[in-house]
Image (spheres, coloured by chain):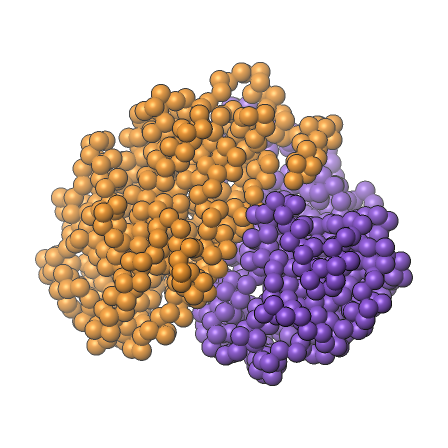
Chain colours: A orange, B purple
Amino acid sequence: MSEKISRRRLVQAGAVAAAGAAIPAAAEAKNRRKKKPVQDVVVVGAGLAGLMAARTLVAKGKRVKVLEARGRVGGRTYSPKYDDVTLDVGGQWLGPTQDKVAALAGKLGVKTFKSYWEGQAVYQRSGSRTLFNVTSPIPPDPDGGETLGFVLKLENLAADISRSAPWQDPNADFYDGQTFETFKLANTTGDGARFLTDLATNAVWACEPRDISLLHLLFYISSAGNETTPGSFIRLTSTTGGAQESRFVGGSQQLSIRMAKKLGARVVLRAPVRQIRQEDGLCHVTSDKGTWRAKQVIVAVPPAVSAFIDYDPILPSDRAQLIQRFPQGNAIKVQAIYDKPFWREEGLSGYVNSDEGPVKLMYDNSPPDGSAGVLLGFIEGQEARLAGRMSASARKSAVLDNFKKTIGNAAGKPKAYVEKNWAQEEWTRGCYGGFLPPGALTGFGPALRKPHGRIHWAGTEHAEIWNGYMDGALRSGEDAAKAALKKL
Amino acid sequence: MSEKISRRRLVQAGAVAAAGAAIPAAAEAKNRRKKKPVQDVVVVGAGLAGLMAARTLVAKGKRVKVLEARGRVGGRTYSPKYDDVTLDVGGQWLGPTQDKVAALAGKLGVKTFKSYWEGQAVYQRSGSRTLFNVTSPIPPDPDGGETLGFVLKLENLAADISRSAPWQDPNADFYDGQTFETFKLANTTGDGARFLTDLATNAVWACEPRDISLLHLLFYISSAGNETTPGSFIRLTSTTGGAQESRFVGGSQQLSIRMAKKLGARVVLRAPVRQIRQEDGLCHVTSDKGTWRAKQVIVAVPPAVSAFIDYDPILPSDRAQLIQRFPQGNAIKVQAIYDKPFWREEGLSGYVNSDEGPVKLMYDNSPPDGSAGVLLGFIEGQEARLAGRMSASARKSAVLDNFKKTIGNAAGKPKAYVEKNWAQEEWTRGCYGGFLPPGALTGFGPALRKPHGRIHWAGTEHAEIWNGYMDGALRSGEDAAKAALKKL
């Protein structure tokens, strides 16, 4: 390895410089002229994980820079205004046991409010529309009992899975040897139970049951609780008492905007990081806005996006291979704005479970005061892949057809229509988070949180608690900051 | 999308340039000063695929540059000398129906010779060492019959799988919903049959049965034949009559070295490509050796490595998501050199199947004239991951213990010991090739060979015939060249 690295440095410093186009060398020369001070830590990415890491370090008196590729902070949380209505086009909910995100919101003065969860929900299935009370634990499917039994089986299996090292489970090989699809087919018989399992997989992981390892799914369920409360699948899919219980006034991006405001000039926007070079006891982090030197680095971007960076020395093979196996889910979030939440007057909750794509899952996403009506539709997993290949107008038309069929004709004529396909975002490349196919955890699990020299990994995919959620992002940032602090 | 692109260009051309660190812009400015002529095609990567693409284009009178990251050509074929013995430390074999690679070798004057395949093979299993005739179709396992039955089942299933669009198979969802591990457990009962299945999976895909989609595995088998001969699992694993039948005199890298020699100054070494920007009807390909403009581009690197490039406009989401799900296998190739192939005198073939890691598969890899003895050991799949975490000396010691136990004590004292861990190679990051986990083909198959504007994809992972092999690499290069030609 050392021979390879030195050869590579030779190329950069020598042959390439001679050819006159040594990009990193040129950026570095500029850096030396400017004599930027050495940072204690450079954080790559100003999403919740990166900003929380920076905040933690600054609180300890450390010198920090946060380099963000986009022209905004917040990563997978983004809350622009449309027609004077703030819409969360990314992550938006919080719920019980997500203590870190609740505490941060409290500290930053970001208020929360309960998701609208009253009236009748719609179960659109096999061409027929049935209403049910939205507080019911499950839609009125003939296979409802079997479905609940299957969910309890998952809860029981997940209860035994370690959050810190699921690959060490005595059954790890068996669980990681199969897809969740295989497990579903082996443990359900009814079409309804299978459909509802698919729908829940779409909703929680933004993928299909065939895409995800049973072991990773069980780990993810296990992680959906706090230090004293075990994880729960029902908590993942529930509104009241679950991960969809509450929303942020002003949008979830407020958390990042306010953290960034306190960090001030430490946050550099439009600075995609291209290279991280570790040499002579320092990291040289080269972005489109120049090079910064730092004692430690925290990379706080999705694993798949972390592959875009040129590492010198290169990533250890375990980490490199892990991120080859860490795809992002597929979700297109569509929202339609109306003068008012008219469906509420008709006794509808706005919540829909449907077997007709592209939108199979809907929520009332109106602002807290009900001053406008907002319907939220999720296009997830395979539906998102197929819908992503449609023209924008064909997709909008298909979405509004779903809305009309389930909520009523008035839903077909919104004042505004907004969609966000996160797989098309260069610096995220898929939502809600990264998941693991079979074989990845048992093959490469130990590489998940192992630093590469002075480089630490953050981002919700690295969290032991509330993996995949805003809460997990904050925890991963705090954990990485603590690991970096120990080395300073 | 167009708004996003234009904003991004603005950043590169405006804000970033103002900040004085616009790396691509600086390289471009230099390029403009030099006024390099516009190429018909720039090829990224001088492995077999890229060189074959360039060769095909040059034969049609086109102006071509090949940009190679390494200081050598050949990609996953590399044939250095140790102790005056040429060793293939990467891909090395060819066999029947691999017509393209055989024809190219003929044209370039690279001779081939038959792999040594005489005498007794060793079956090391459950602590006991059994000899069997190397020409036997299967080791002397009590589950041999069951194993052959399982192999025939695979042959039959694969016979129906399309090479061009396996995701359209009527059973695609079923096959792509499960790992090969799941299929193995459902269709075998004996420990021996399962062990031999694992061993064959290690040998062909350099992964574990849990890592790979049954659909991708069946496609891969289907692709292991030529236009008139259906694919075959037995052909994949066989020496005589199979993919390990012959080797190249002077090493497989001779193919690339000779192609590159004919291409002359068109091949630029030590020029890793960092960005491909499509603008105003041209591609601007920026490498560490400068920027070239071209009408079309062929990216001929492993899918996982193609993720390192900054694309502007960004990759379509289907392609981006596909390459998030396209991991490289894990193989460490170890070779030991002796004065002579002493095992031949003892009636041994050098071929070993073993259930004791790290080396579970061995071959006689001596030079054609037998002037030295070379034993080749493969460390594959999970064994490669575990062995990669060992110290070099511990790994060597474990390997030589395998060699001694199966071939004899003399195998423990080689003149030279050489290993190559392809997962540690920056510009390959795993061997033998990329494979697909469940869900990838059904989710993203159509993106596999679809160009991104003026960018075409090559590399053996894109081949319809002999996918994963040198033959497939050449075919993929030729196919990409033809697609580019049509647009010139």
- Side of B176 where B130 appears, left or right: right
Q: Residue, x 59% and y 35% (percent of image)?
A: A312
Which is nearer the eye, A436 or B340? Answer: B340
Q: Position of residue B179 (x, y in %)?
A: 48, 68
Q: Quadrant of the C terminus of chain A?
A: top left
Judge whether B23 appears above or below A315 on screen. above
Residue A276: quadrant of the picture: top right
Q: Residue, x 29% and y 41% (percent of image)?
A: A79
Judge whether B134 appears above or below A86 on screen. below
Q: Position of residue A374 (x, y in %)?
A: 22, 51
Which is nearer the eye, A89 or A192? Answer: A192
- Side of A6 where A278 appears, left or right: left
Residue B271: quadrant of the picture: top right
Which is nearer the eye, B66 or B394? Answer: B394
Q: Is residue A68 visible?
A: no
Q: Quadrant of the N terminus of chain A?
A: top right
